[in-house]
Amino acid sequence: MLLAITTQFSCQQRPSKEDMLAGMGEEDLRALQSMNSTPLHVDGISSPSIKQSTEVQLSDDTKIIGVSHHGKYRAYPVSLLSGMMDHVVNDTVHSQDGNGVSPVTVTYCSMTDCARVVTGDLPEGVSHLDLGTLGLLDGGLALRWKGRQFKQNDQIEGLTDIPFELTTWEEWKSKHPETEVFAGRSKK
């Protein structure tokens, strides 16, 4: 079952503050009552572990962000992008002919189920984009790019959106059996 194909970003409507706080205990509510924006600077993952589809075990209903870029296919399991430190993956895709390298950054907000995939030009000697997060901004993911803050769905100078599919692992791997898979942070 294909969930969405998009050329920019895919988001559910941002939940209200009341919806986000519903179900929390009284103590947590007191601590978070005035929260709508939170500053929290986190660098994006810049050393992603990428594996072949045959090397990973994912259930067929695993929700993924599927990216096709320069003839290569990559699946990013949403579950691996949902941790507080894991909402941005600064990846690099080598072209199918092996002659080019292109940055691909995948962003995902677990609160709003918002995904976005971007690329941009790299300065000489730099291997990936340097996007990060800054916590929440107006109830959604705040991104940091070149020292500035943006909402996840803002137009960002110097970055271009890449089409992606928000789908299941079963759907993606049946269409792209040669896909590679984001498997979390590289262990150094």
Image (spheres, rainbow, N blue to C red):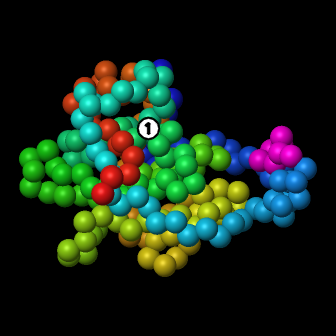
Indicate the position of residue 75 as horizontal and vertical percent values: 36, 38
Q: Residue furthest bottom?
A: 147
Q: Residue at x 27, y 39 (%)?
A: 51
Q: Is residue 55 above or below residue 61?
A: below
The answer to whether residue 160 is seen in the rendering is: no
Q: Residue at x 44, y 38 (%)?
A: 77
Apparent side of residue 186 relative to residue 85 in the rendered image (left or right): left
Image quarter where the C terminus lies is bottom left
Q: Residue at x 78, y 62 (%)?
A: 35
Indicate the position of residue 47 as horizontal and vertical percent values: 32, 57
Q: Does the magenta segment cover residue 22?
A: yes
Apparent side of residue 183 relative to residue 94 in the rendered image (left or right): right
Indicate the position of residue 37 as horizontal and vertical percent values: 71, 65
Q: Which residues are magenta?
A: 19-25
Quarter of the image where one finds residue 119:
bottom left
Indicate the position of residue 11 as horizontal and vertical percent values: 59, 45
Query: Quick one: label 1, few (<14), some, or many (20+) residues within 10 Å?
Result: many
Apparent side of residue 114 relative to residue 54 in the rendered image (left or right): right
Query: Which three-letter amino acid code belongs to the residue tagged 1?
Result: Pro
Q: Residue at x 24, y 58 (%)?
A: 102
Please, what secondary structure does the residue beneath circle 1 have? strand
Q: Does the magenta segment cover residue 85?
A: no
Q: Report how many numbered discs are placed on residues in the image.
A: 1
Residue, disc 1: 77
The answer to whether residue 18 is seen in the rendering is: yes
Q: Nearer the viewer, residue 136 or 158?
A: 136
Q: Residue furthest front?
A: 188
